[in-house]
Image (spheres, rainbow, N blue to C red):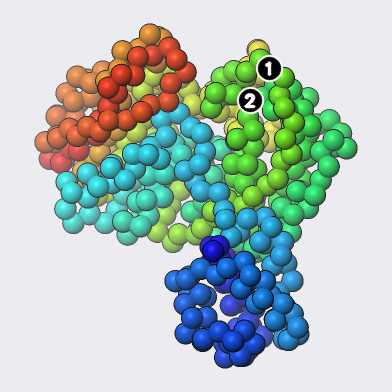
Amino acid sequence: MIATGHILRLIEDKREKQHISLQTISDCLGMDISRLNDIESGKYSITNEQLSKLIDVCNTDKKLDISGFDTIKKTGWDNPISLESRRYIGSKAKLVGWIMNIINSETRDVHSFFDVFAGTGVVTKVALDYFDSVVTNDFLYSNNVIYKAFFGKGSIDKTKIANILDKYNAIDEKSLKDNYFSINFGGKYFQYDLAKKVGYIREDIENKKPYLSKKEYCTLIATLIYNIDRFANTVGHFDAYIKKTIEYKPLRLRMIEAKSYDNVDIFQEDANALAKNIKTDVAYIDPPYNSRQYSRFYHIYETLTKWDKPPLYGVALKPEAENMSKYCTTRAAAAFEDLIKNLNARYIAVSYNNTYHSKSSSSQNKITLEQLKHILDKYGKTHIYECSHKFFNTGKTDFNDHKELLFITNVR
């Protein structure tokens, strides 16, 4: 069975525009009309065989134009890439269920949610189904585009996007000329021919920008990022690349799980400044705690998103520093207290993971557990919850019995 929500909605749209009844389709397929209704509504899946028969019948009938459906199917609309699949340090993908369960059990009469440091966006994604309104924020350019693609407001012409991806997939990367991406990152962070294709596609997306909606533009960039993530010659971030020969594997783009929610507002601002302008029932905080700057760890995706082609420096090929977080410095505790003081929230939820013994100075938290609790206790009654968690580790830190902590503060 395949998930066919996107495809069936396309068929439904075309069928209704051409005034073709479900009964007509039912008679052609010999399928009960109530089951067709359930399939179109997404209640049931459909087999590849049934989908192919539906397409064949509709083409034979000559009443329903379904051009582009084969392309849509090939580029992954029936099996899109999920938001959670990206490699990202500190991702809460495996913890978000536990986090949201604690928040739900410890809060009352809540309708709005503020994801202050959204990171991968997985907490926002779940919050969208729990709360009437959600504000999400991160100051990385790449994360901002990813949020707009996966759950930002706006529409997508599915056939147009599928045709674009199909053309990208048909490109022979070995025949492409060098470009900014391949010259700088080929043979290092990505296999050389693959890097040529990435650079070519990103340039083409920029050229197509005038003909794309904002949602379509962000979706194409996010689709590119999510598809190349598994090809990156790294341990999961771009602070360095692995010094080895990279095996060639063809790049075939598969669509991301792009949806549109009306109850979300997306920002790319300094969290402390934005907090002064947001009123919310629940504020969820998961800031960077150690000295590793996320804008530097994911500089390639920042460059790929902005596509400003900056000069690069050092062995790691990074651009000039920007979007540097004070939470990764000795000013972290003061910044955290300023944030808590200025939040207009009834409840504050804070994720924290410093139950391990770090052998690397860059892994040591800039806010201690004691400082965090002391600050939160100033502003309300705080409870602490813990969950065992296998953390991302490059081998320098002892993570035995590592736990994720969640602070819930009922603000006075």
Q: Position of residue 116 (x, y in %)?
A: 36, 39
In the picture, the disc for residue 233 is: 2
In the displayed structure image, the side of residue 410 where residue 199 appears, left or right: right
Q: Position of residue 280 (x, y in %)?
A: 28, 49
Q: Is residue 223 above or below residue 216?
A: above
In the picture, the disc for residue 307 is: none
Question: Are dots 2 and 1 in contact, CB under 8 Å?
Answer: yes
Disc 2 residue type? Asn
User: How many numbered discs?
Assistant: 2
Q: Position of residue 389 (x, y in %)?
A: 32, 30
Which image quarter holds the N terminus?
A: bottom right
Q: Is residue 25 above or below residue 170?
A: below
Disc 1 residue type? Lys
Can residue 77 be seen at all in this image of the molecule? yes
- The answer to which of 211 and 42 lies nearer the viewer is 42
In the displayed structure image, the side of residue 333 where residue 197 appears, left or right: right
Quadrant in the rendering for residue 303: top right
Quadrant in the rendering for residue 65: bottom right
Q: Secondary structure at mark 2?
A: loop
Q: Residue at x 77, y 38 (%)?
A: 197
Q: Is residue 195 above or below residue 400?
A: below
Q: Residue at x 36, y 23 (%)?
A: 289
Q: Position of residue 37 (x, y in %)?
A: 49, 81
Residue identified by numbered label 1: 244
